[in-house]
Amino acid sequence: MISRADLDFLPKVNWRFWGPVLFVLVAFPSVWLYLRHRDLEASRAELLREHATLTGSLAPRYNTARDRIETAILRSVGPYEGDLRDPVFTWEALAREPVLYARTRLGEIHDRADLAASVRHRYADQLLACLGVEFLWARELFDKGAFLRPSYVDSVRGADTPERVNALRADLRVRMQRDQEFISHGLARPYLMLAVDEGRLSIEGPTRVYIYDLRDGRPLVRTRGEGNDLVLVPFRIAGLPAPAPGAARGRPLNVSQHDCSIANSVRRAIGVPVTGLVHGPEPETREADDASAESDAAAPRD
């Protein structure tokens, strides 16, 4: 073979200069990546220690309560087990302080993975307003306490850049400052009230209502209502058209009527008087209204 040195037309390579240059070009990214990875590992470890310190007393309480809530909801979306009332449980105990409240749909939950998304849905809801009980939304407790779940720790371990770790650290400090009081207040609630709509919409079918003791997960009340035993009795105001005949009967007219009927089912289950008009009189027919109008027209005037 011909030596490169004998090929005068080829450019001469000054390896004394280019050798160090190539070494720097290869070594610098490697060193930078190594240092960045070391800083990332140190930042993640520091954030995990900070998380454990800040949430050490709150996280175990939250996760215990969260697991009890999820277990109660999963149990409630199975076959209906019949009405129940703990004889020791009273209306006074329920109304004494706010309860945790959630509403779900029967067809949305198949396993624990579906549960949080269903609880977070914002359904039209008047049940607690009709019942007259103060409450805190369980969905808010779910959202505000997300940083206390093991999945949050997994997200820290999976952070792949120092910038992501810094963002998680800032988020942790904001959550501790902003949401800690609400979470502690929510965890102090002794009862969970759960409404489970069996239909695609609440007014399209029965609704179950459960009350659980969150201190031990024990069911206290279990009832089921059709939502059609509260009727609105229409009345006529002089000078305005008469209501349509039979408008007060049949299916519930709106969410408020349905939910107030379900609230009465809860009251019956606990043993307190119901509210509203139940089994109201049949409204007058249009024929009777027309006959009355004709007689008024035929009557002599002064």
Image (cartoon, rainbow, N blue to C red):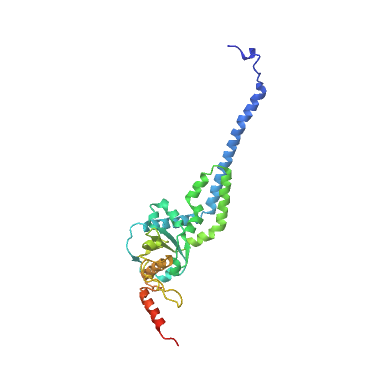
**Quadrant assignment, res 242:** bottom left
* The one of 247 and 162 positioned closer to us in this rendering: 247
Could you say where residue 70 lies in the image, as x and y percent from the top left?
A: 42, 56
**Residue 4 screen position, x and y as percent:** 62, 14
Q: Position of residue 302 (x, y in %)?
A: 45, 88
Which residue is more in the foreground, 156 or 77? 77
Q: In the image, residue 208 lies at what x, y percent?
A: 37, 62
Which residue is found at the position 42% from the left and 51% from the top?
113
Q: Horizontally, is 140 left or right of 80 in the view?
A: right
Instruction: Quadrant for the N terminus, please.
Output: top right
Q: How many marks?
A: 0
Look at the image and tell me whether residue 280 can be seen: no
Q: Is residue 261 left or right of residue 54?
A: left
Location of residue 222 with respect to 14 vertically, above or below? below
Q: Residue at x 61, y 31 (%)?
A: 27
Name the one closer to the observer, 198 or 291: 291
Q: Is residue 118 visible?
A: yes
Residue sitting at 41 percent across and 52 percent down?
112
Instruction: Indicate the quadrant where residue 131 lies.
Output: bottom left
